[in-house]
Amino acid sequence: MKEGPREAKSWLGAVIILLFVVLHLPYINADPVDHHSWRQVTTLGVARSFYYESADFFHPRVFERGDKSGITGMECPIYNFMIFIFMTIFGYANWYGRVLSLVFGAFGLYWLWRLAALENGRGPALMSLLFLAVSPLYFFFSRNTQPDIPMTSLLIGSFYFIETWGKSGRSGHFWTASILITAAALIKLPAIIFLPLFAFTIYFKSRERLVACWRAYLFIAIPVLLAGGWYLYSRYLVAKYELQYFYLGADILKSIAFFPSIKFLRTVIISRLPEIVANYAAFPFFVAGLALYKKIGYSRNTAILLLLMIPYYIAGGFNLYVHNYYSLPAAPLVALVAGPAAWYLIRNSRKAVKTLAVVLVVLAPVVGVLRTTVWYRPLYSEFRAARGMVERHVPDKALMVAAWRVDPTLLFFTYRNGWAIPPEAADASDLYARGARFLMTTAKADSAIAQHSLLEQVERNDSLILYAITRGEKPGDSEPESR
C-alpha cells in the first residue's frame, strides 16, 4: 500500500520508540535513591499507603505526617492508584511507577510522532520524534516515579486526537481528546493552561460562529469542572485534616511575581531550555524554526502552542525555577518546532549548512542521553539498609523521626510514618511529647543531635544510626507506644 506524503513511515518511528524503551530497561527496577528522590518517594508513599493502610481513593495519605492521620489534599491520585494496583497484583515493590512512566513516555512519543506527521509530513515527524526522545528531561523523567510524564504524555495524546477529529470528524476522536486532557489536568493542574488550543482548534475546524460552537465550550467545561472540583476538594481535605503537604497552587502570586526576574531568565530560559528541554545539538533547530517560521509553514496549532507557553511560564514562575521537571511540557513543543526545521535545512540548504545540520542530528541522541547520566547515579544507596535496622527494633505503628534534612527519602526507607526534619531541628523532648519514639539519622549528621540526653543509641552501621527517644528511660524499660 502506497503511503501518502503526510503519513509517518512506521518502521523508522517504531525503531526510535523501541530504542527509547530498551535504553531505560537497565534502570527500571532501581530504588528511588537518585535524582529527585524526594519527589519519587512522595509519590510512592501515597501508593504505599493505599497498599498497607487504606485503598480509599478519595482520602490519600502521605507518610511524612507527623502525629496526624496522613490524609491530605493533593493532585488527583490516579497515577498513585495505578501503582497501588500493580502492588496488589504483583506484591509490593518500589519500581512499578518507573514502568508506568516508561509506558506513558512511549505513548507520548507515539502520539507526538503521529501528530507531527499530520501537521508536517513524515520526514519532519521523524525528526520531531527523535528530538523528543532524546530530550534529557523527557528521557530521564520517563523512568521516574513522578506524575509529570503521564501529564505531558496525555497532553500530547489530546493534541493528537483533537487534530485527527478535525480531519476525520469522528466523534470518538473528540471524546478521546476530552478524556485525555481531563486526565492530564487531574494528574497535574498546569495542563489546564493548554485548553485554549482545543477551543481554537474546534472553532476553526467546525467553521461555526463562536457563540454556536458548543463543542468548544463542552470540551473546556469537562476538564475545568472535574479538575477544578478535585482541587477544591483537595483544599477541603487540607482544612479538615490539618495537613498541608502538596503545593496545590499555594503562593501562586509569589510564583508569578518571580517570572520577570533575572534568576528566572538565566536559569529557566537561557540555561535550561537549550541544555535539558531540548539538548545542545537539537536546540539550534528550534531557534532556526522560529527564525524560518513562515518559510517552513508551521500549522496554526503550533503557533497557538507557542503562545500558550507564555502563560504557562508566567504561572509556573518560581516553581519552574526550582523544579526542572515543570519545564517538561515545553519539550514536545520544542520538538514540534525543531523537527521540521531540521528537515528543511537538510533538504533546502547549501552544502555547508546541510552538513552541519546532519552532524547535529546525528549528535543529538548522543548529547541528549549522555546529559542524563549524572541523574542516574545513586545518591542515597545506604538508605536501603534503613528498613532492616528499623524492623529489628521499631514496632510497625511507632512514629519515626528521620533527622537528616527536609527531605522524606530517609523516612520513606524506614517504612514508618512520622517526621522528616533537619538534625539541628530535632528537639527530642518535643518529639516525644508528640508521639515519636525512634529517631534515625546519618553518620554525617549525627554530630548535630548526638548530645541530646533523651536519645539512646539502638543500632548503627557505617552510614545510619538508630536512636530510641527514651524520656530518660533505657530502651526496653517500657514498650514503645504505637499509634
Image (tube, rainbow, N blue to C red):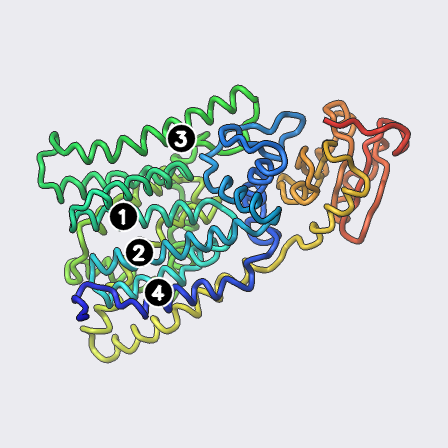
Numbered disc in front, either 4 or 2: 2
- x, y (%) of residue 331? 36, 54
Q: What amino acid type is highlighted by mark number 4? A: Leu
296 up-or-down from 416: above or below: below
Of residues 324 and 89, the one drawn nearer to the viewer in this rendering: 89
55 up-or-down from 281: above or below: above
- Examine the rendering and report whether any part of residue 306 can be seen: no
Point 60% across, 36% down: residue = 49
Badge 1 marks a residue whose secondary structure is helix
Point 36% across, 46% down: residue = 154
Of residues 224 and 9, the one drawn nearer to the viewer in this rendering: 9
Give the residue at mark 2: 112
Give the residue at mark 3: 253
Q: Earlier in the sequence, mark 3 or mark 4?
A: 4
Q: CA distance from mark 1 to mark 4?
A: 18 Å
Point 25% across, 75% down: residue = 353
Q: CA distance from mark 3 to mark 1?
A: 29 Å
